[in-house]
Amino acid sequence: MNMKTIKILCIAATLCLFAACSNNTDTYRLSGKLENCDECTLYLMEMQSQGVKALDTIKANKNGSFSVDERLDYESIFLLQGPSDYIMICPKKGEKINIAADYASLSSTYNVKGSEESSKLKLLSDKQIMTRVALKAMYDQLNMADADSYDTVRQEIAAKYKMLRDNQRSFLINYINTNKGSLTTLVALYRNMENSPLIDFKTDLDVYKNVLDGLKKTYPDNVNTKNLEQFINQAEQLQNK
């Protein structure tokens, strides 16, 4: 083997090693373009059992573009918080996530690419927005009712409300069953409708256990899995008292 061949093999080995290191990176790329944004700011936060934890401040340029590499020690659900709204993402290491949205109304305008789990979160977000729109229409209908028809309209609204709640609950349970093992099932599990849980641990502990069973297979050592397991254990102890 001549020296030229040896050099080529050494270079190839170095490139392979570099590629392996790059694929094992503990970061992900977060970039995007925001409309109605002139050097605006997004706040990256992690959703935790005790609330949210601030992680980073992301500054967009005058054109509303931004691009940052964020460290990911473990997979979790994160928020991109704007002035009055937010986007949820669930990145994996090495992903290149791209977001397009209107800065003034993030959740109702955004699109996300490059992250399968974050795309799943958008499905949950879109469903929640549709529910809010339906609720507003109900309240508007009730507020416009005159005195003579108020009781009749109220009964109609009550029936619509129950149907909407049942529909949202069925959607979430179906989402959990079809996405078992995804961290995004935690978001579905804790969804509320007007500050009332759609899946209540007091009556739906089996759904909580279903989510946990999936996460223990895909994320056995993840802090979110451990927190859910601890919560379920505490809930069972309360029920057994």
Image (cartoon, rainbow, N blue to C red):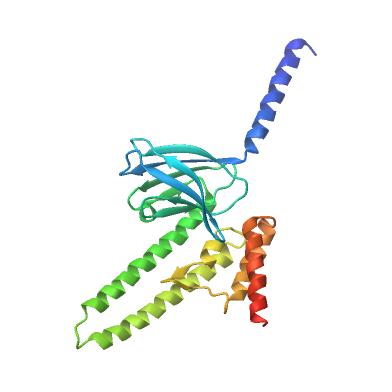
Q: In this view, does 216 lie to the left or right of 199?
A: right
Q: Residue sitting at 78 percent across and 11 percent down? A: 2
Q: Residue sitting at 59 percent across and 58 percent down? A: 182
Q: Is residue 142 left or right of residue 234?
A: left
Figure quadrant of the C terminus: bottom right
Residue sitting farthest toward the top = 3
Figure quadrant of the N terminus: top right
Q: Is residue 147 left or right of residue 109?
A: left
Q: Residue sitting at 55 percent across and 48 percent down? A: 91
Q: Nearer the viewer, residue 133 or 113?
A: 133
Provide residue 204's location: percent of width, then percent of height.
58, 76
Provide residue 24's location: percent of width, then percent of height.
65, 38
Looking at the image, residue 84 lies above or below residue 14? below
Looking at the image, residue 201 lies above or below residue 4? below
Provide residue 171's location: percent of width, then percent of height.
48, 69
Looking at the image, residue 220 lies above or below residue 9? below
The answer to which quarter of the image holds residue 84 is: bottom left
Q: Nearer the viewer, residue 57 or 213?
A: 57
Provide residue 144's location: percent of width, then percent of height.
21, 77
The answer to which quarter of the image holds residue 234 is: bottom right
